[in-house]
Image (cartoon, rainbow, N blue to C red):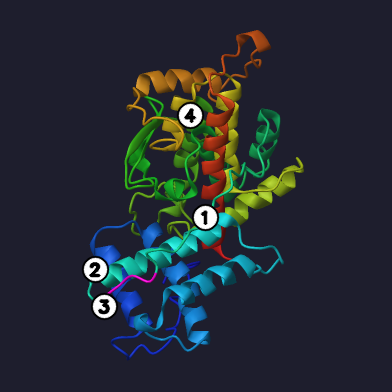
Amino acid sequence: MKRGERRPPPPIGDPNDPHGLWVWTQRYLEWLEVRHFSARTVRQRRVHLGYFLAWCEARSLRRPVDVTRPILERYQRHLHLARKVDGHPLSLTSQTGRLADVRGFFRWLVRENALLANPAADLVMPRPDKRLPRAVLSPLEADTVMNQPNVRDPIGLRDRAMLETLYSTGMRRSELLALKVDDLDAERGTVMIRLGKGRKDRLIPIGERAVAWVDKYLREVRPGLALGRDEGVLFLTELGESLVPEYVTHRLRKYVEAADVGQKGACHIFRHTMATAMLDHGADIRYVQEMLGHASLSTTQIYTHLSIKKLQKIHAATHPAARLERRRPPSEGERHDVAGDNERTELFSSLAAEAAEDDELDGP
């Protein structure tokens, strides 16, 4: 087991009962893996079903046949009343995610003939809020955060390269950690994100400033980290291993706090900031959507795939850190923000929901 990885949870219930909830849950997770669901999806469902199994075990509900719709409605009320370690209630995103994965599990049980009827079929899901991101940095605040790592230290230089990459591209934390050296094309100013959310590849621009910092990391730091078996992962630990999500979140959160800009956050704050900066500087929401890897917004049509050349042009024109030289911000008359209030709200609501998912998977 690599450093930072979590040990698998102990069985909840009787692992020797072939008809028990625990055994059926393990079969379901294996079924997801065989059908090539992403590791993130499998992990999320493992966590969410673990919460459900623990709740069932405390009430002596040990087999799928013991679970009825009234039981599931009780579990839904439990989620509504539950409190996190900090005393705050579970977000609607967390409640809906846990219920949706339980519902998917029981749908699969019916498909596998473990149950004759699905007790979760008519479960009414909570109505989601349209939440906005909790924190967004201004360009000046973002630059202040960028300057926090000690770039004379190899790990500090690595962290600066990660921060610049997140800020320039708005990629997800999981996408950053999955980057390979060959995914970055410095000459063309692009980065290939492979098997992002929905297991889709996408090619997006990366600014000159971010490319310069990543290149410096590649030349001066990475060769000293990749001393053992090099699998081509771009960002590495001190031991030459792949980074784990919680470690990256912890380090980047410290830089945001050290910047003392009045904001809290880690990886996702740069995703919010990139989207806000490009929209505020006049980018069409379709281009921001393409950068973020959103297939569609629920209130808009599904857009056609955009040309990488056009996307690069929009990125260079609207991202405040896309170029090495500093540029003055556009005047009010120069801005051409075509995103309506509803479209912006939908975009940022989806970003807030993503952040909530990451927070829950990271745990307390």
Q: Earlier in the sequence, mark 4 or mark 1?
A: 4
Which label sits in the foreground, 3 or 4?
3
Q: Earlier in the sequence, mark 3 or mark 4?
A: 3
Whichever of callouts 2 and 4 sits on the residue coming sooner in the sequence is 2
> Cα distance, mark 3 to mark 2?
8 Å
Q: Is residue 117 magenta?
A: yes
Query: What is the span of residues highlighted in magenta in the rendered image?
Result: 115-119
Between marks 2 and 1 in the image, the one whose residue lies nearer the viewer? 2
N-terminal of the two: label 2 or label 1?
A: 2
Q: Which mark is residue 50?
A: none
The residue nearer to you, when weighing 266 against 181, is 266
Amino acid bearing label 3: Ala
In front: 139, or 100? 100
Does dot 3 land on a helix, a strand or a loop?
loop
> In the picture provided, is 234 more to the left or to the right than 332?
left
Q: Main secondary structure of the magenta part?
A: loop
What's the CA distance linking mark 2 and mark 4?
Answer: 39 Å
What is the secondary structure assignment of the residue under circle 2?
A: helix
Residue found 56% across the figure and 41% down from its top: 349
